[in-house]
Image: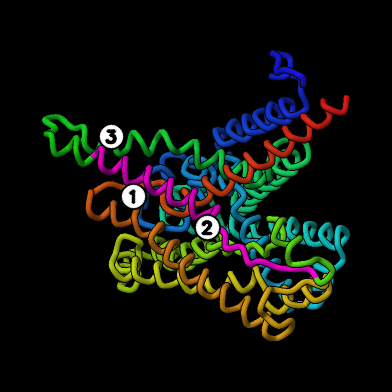
Amino acid sequence: MKTFTIRDLFFSKLAKRIWFTVFILFIFRLGAMIPTPLINGEALRSYMESSSGAGGLFDFINLIGGGSFKRFSVFAMSVSPYITASIIVQLLSQDVIPVLSRWGKEGVNGKKKSHMLTRVLSLILAFVQAIAIALGFNAYTNGTLLTITNGDYTPVILVAIILTAGTAILIWLGDLITKHGIGNGISIIILAGIISQLPNEILNIWNTYMVEGATATNYATMILVYLILLLLVVIVVYMQEATRKIPIQYANVTAKESAVSDKNYLPLKINSAGVIPVIFASAIISLPVTVAGFFGTTDWGKWVTENLTLTANWGFALYVVMTIAFTFFYAYVQIDPEKMSENLGKQNAFIPNVRPGEETRKYISGVLGRLTCSGAIYLAVVVSIPLILSRVAGINVIIGGTSIIILAGVALETVKQMRMQSSSRSYTNFLE
């Protein structure tokens, strides 16, 4: 067995992938610091400070971009248009558009076509979104963000092109990480953006309680907040890995042989929908708040900003309800009991004590429904705790439930991939 050496730390296959990923993330963080030309930074900063923590859509974009949106850097849009495009293409592939459904059955070639469509749609969404944001911000700041003279909107178009190019570069960097680095590139970039905001979150909580003349109550409350957030991370990690294993048996394998093997099962995660329901709910509840921010002087704008933010009662209740509803919706999008039943039949496999066909479909659907119920409650609790902390403890928790789920999910998948590559290296060394 080959022992670990210092050379392996820098020149092994796994080490090269890790260092390549670190290099790409350095470029990402560098680009997040480069300001977009033609933008009045002071006007933008004033708006961002007034709207921070209001539960707007921009808070989420800023978070996954590692603070680049508040700086309005060239990477201000981050990969949020890609996330939106991916969700749209995935939903439309569920027998909504026949062409997309056919691509999903064509294997590698179909995936390449879907990926290309996702990238093109991402750039279109990025350009439209960039124009909307530039015009909206300019209107809110009374024309001080961009200089538009005599109806010449060239500065808006130039800013939109720059931001779209920034998104395109990030997608390209994500592809490089996927091919030559560790983990899924887009997910790693999102992970890096969120992690970059963790020190600010820790200092934010510290500065809230460590004021002049702080009492023992301040210290105790601060420690309690830190412990609650840490416990939340532990819960998310556990639930991300929680799986219900439905035993299956093959027609050409005896029951005794099947019992010996622990791999003959159908795995169903408690949270099979992942973080998508939370992103859906957050985007939908934040959209009217974001739009109302540009029309805050009107009666409806004031009502929306006062009642539909995540810290308000109505906004909080709608957020939780939509999270639960989208969890059920997306779980059955991700897992189709009918297709699973058909695939088991094609493989001459069946669930013990359950008849193949319609009875198997109903059984899987029932199990999935019960698991999704638990998963929906879990997601609702995770997204609620940071918001409740914000209201009770009087602090603005930047890293919310969505961020923690993304952090845990991406980190766990990345560690799994690193272990697989490390195991592959061990087998190679053994054969050598």
343 and 382: which is toward the camera: 343
| Alpha-carbon span between mark 3 and mark 1 | 21 Å
| Outermost residue to the front | 256
Q: Position of residue 208 (x, y in %)?
A: 24, 38
- Read off the residue under disc 2: 135
380 and 213: which is toward the camera: 380
Q: Main secondary structure of the magenta part?
A: helix
Residue 98, quarter of picture: bottom right
Tell me the tag on residue 50: 1
Start-end of magenta stretch: 222-250
The residue type indicated by label 3 comes to Trp
Q: Position of residue 272 (x, y in %)?
A: 58, 63
The residue type indicated by label 1 comes to Ser
| Alpha-carbon span between mark 3 and mark 2 | 37 Å
| Alpha-carbon span between mark 1 and mark 2 | 18 Å
- Read off the residue under disc 3: 206
Q: Secondary structure at mark 1?
A: helix
Q: Secondary structure at mark 2?
A: helix
Asked if residue 272 lies in the magenta stretch, the reply is no
Q: Secondary structure at mark 3?
A: helix
Say which residue appears at 57% left-offset and 78% top-offset. Answer: 366
Q: Let me know if residue 96 appears in the view.
A: no
Mark 2 crowdedness (10 Å alpha carbons): few <14, some 14-19, many ≥20: some
Q: Let me know if residue 350 appears in the view.
A: yes
Does residue 386 appear to the left or right of 145 in the view shown?
left
Say which residue appears at 64% left-offset and 64% top-offset. Answer: 87
